[in-house]
Image: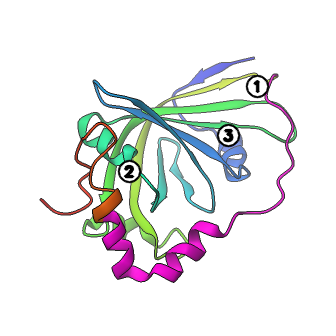
Amino acid sequence: MGKKLDFITPELKEFIENQKLFFVGTAASDGRVNVSPKGTDSFRVIDKNKIVWLNLTGSGNETAAHLLKSSRMTIMFCAFEGKPMILRLYGNAKIYHKRDSGFEKYSNLFPENVGARQIIEMDVDLVQTSCGFAVPFMDFKEERTTLNAWAEKQGEDNIKAYWKEKNTLSIDGFETGIFEG
């Protein structure tokens, strides 16, 4: 059954590396709680207490807005194949934009992507596993290429225009910090 750990074990790191999907949960002190599914080759375990993930352009930018209000973040993985398990990583996160040295520090860990919006770095202070006995089996077919193809077609200038239109404020009106002050 479930366990609580202070760090990501080598076995859990391997589990994470084999997952095709993860979920990110954030919230400010007020407003809506956000849970976002994330895919593609966008997650890295840096060490037993640090992860980073590449946040791609999307229709909203809730995670960024929430992290500016409160650094708390939860990441969840579910085993849809093989042995059942749910894995949650709890911690505090920082957000790096392309203008930040942290973005440059980690960007080489990911495939180049014109839609790359931010890199999120999280210091993990609690790792929790639970049974996952009710999580269904689902077969992975393939990655969706729609978002990356859209970003390529848009190009950098149109992506920035999209950010101005869709990614500067959260649904609760919080600033996302995507552009310098």
The correct choice, above or below, for 118 with respect to 15 in the image is below
Residue 132 bears which disc, if any? 1
Real-space Cα separation, disc 1 to disc 2, in angstroms? 29 Å
Q: Name the amino acid type tagged 1.
A: Gly
Residue 5 left/right relative to 105? right
* Crowd class of label 1 (few under 14; some 14 to 19; many from 20; radius 10 Å): some
Closest to the observer: 50 or 26? 26
- 131 relative position to 57: left or right: right
Q: Which residues are magenta?
A: 134-163
Q: Farthest residue in the left direction? A: 181
Q: Which residue occupies 43% across, 82% down? A: 155
Mark 3 = which residue?
12
Q: Secondary structure at mark 1?
A: loop
| Residue 168 appears left or right of 119 | left
Marked residue nearer the N-terminal end (1 or 2): 2
Tell me, yes or no, whether the highlighted magenta stretch contains residue 152. Answer: yes
- Report the amino acid beneath label 2: Asn
Residue 76 lies in magenta, yes or no?
no
Three-letter code, disc 3 = Leu
Alpha carbon separation for disc pair 3 and 1: 15 Å
Residue behind mark 2: 61
Quarter of the view holding residue 133: top right
Residue 139 spot, x, y in % from top left: 87, 49
Give me the C-alpha separation between circle 2 and circle 3. 28 Å
Q: Main secondary structure of the magenta part?
A: helix
SS state under label 2: loop
